[in-house]
Image (cartoon, rainbow, N blue to C red):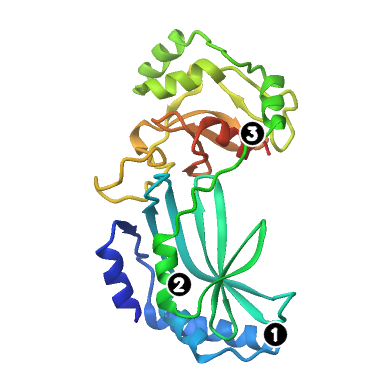
Amino acid sequence: MNRAKFLDMLSGLSVQYKPSQFYDHERNKKTVGEKLKKLSEKYNKELSDRVILFLTEFNEIEFYRTESVSKDVLHITLRLRSAATDPDSGELILYIGSAVNSCGTIERFVLSENGSFGAVSDTEKKRYISDSAEGFFEYILTKEYDCHITVTEDTYKKLREAGWYEGRRADISSIISAVKANNVELTEAQKEFLREFVGIESPEPFDQHSFYVADGNTYRGMDGFYENPYQNNDAPNNSNTVSQTVTVRVGWCDGFTTELGLSPDGLIVHDSSVIGRTVMEGWQIILN
């Protein structure tokens, strides 16, 4: 299978391929060839022809797909990043891509010096996937992760210190009026988030995890802040899909260096994407 056939296969599946307008296949082949040569010399390892062929054909591909059970949107990337020596086998392994969901990187894909594919994560050493490119492609197109984080007691503690408590229902009538004046129409999910969290502020303003949810005077639409990975109107019905026009900025986080956004589904938007399958998962990522 070559690159063109793989991309044709993607077009026939329920995934959203995101072509790069800057990609040039011949230039990529040259760049990858030079990088592989340097890595081979650095680690004193000879890479198999299968490795070289795969990376010169399939480097720089990314697409999105929706898990059939959890309905999470996965961002799959194939891109040669770096290399390392496997501490157990002594083999050279190349980091060639990743699977990411709304909670972050689930696992990274690796390719060994002899051409076998595997995956590694923060909690798992290299796990074998396949000896063939076809087997690897089947894996990244069908793997069901349903992988999400656990909200810890420390996150609840930090929220309570900031003024949150279970059952909190703040009056947001003035906020609704204020944002309407700025041509922003809040959804019911956004209103529910604000009733629970508006006005909370971490007690340590200069801590790297400091945050606050402001009042309505600072809210604005965040057009262009979030890049929707789906083109046109063919996105699946999923809570991780955000419409640009109704995403609003409601505060700041990361030591007041990053805008805190709120998707129309009432989920936290951070650094250009929705984080967490739930609001509390989003707070977990920000605060820990």
Residue type for callout 2: Phe
Find the distance from the CA under tag 3 to the CA under tag 2.
41 Å
Residue at x 42% of width, y 44% of height: 70
Which numbered mark, 3 or 1, is in the foreground of this view? 1
* Left or right: 68 in relation to 193: left
Residue type for callout 3: Phe
Camera-nearest residue between 50 and 230: 50
Which residue carries the number 2 mark? 136
- Residue 183 in the image, given as x and y percentages of width and height: 34, 22
Q: Secondary structure at mark 1?
A: helix
Q: Quadrant of residue 226?
A: top left
Residue at x 32% of width, y 57% of height: 15
Find the distance from the CA under tag 1 to the CA under tag 2.
27 Å
- Residue 196 in the image, given as x and y percentages of width and height: 54, 17
Q: Quadrant of residue 126?
A: bottom right
Which comes before the other along the chain, label 3 or label 1?
A: 1
Which residue carries the number 3 mark? 256
Q: Secondary structure at mark 3?
A: loop
* Left or right: 233 in relation to 82: left
Q: What is the quadrant of the C terminus in the image?
A: top right
Which comes before the other along the chain, label 3 or label 2?
A: 2
Which residue carries the number 1 mark? 42
- Residue 153 in the image, given as x and y percentages of width and height: 70, 30
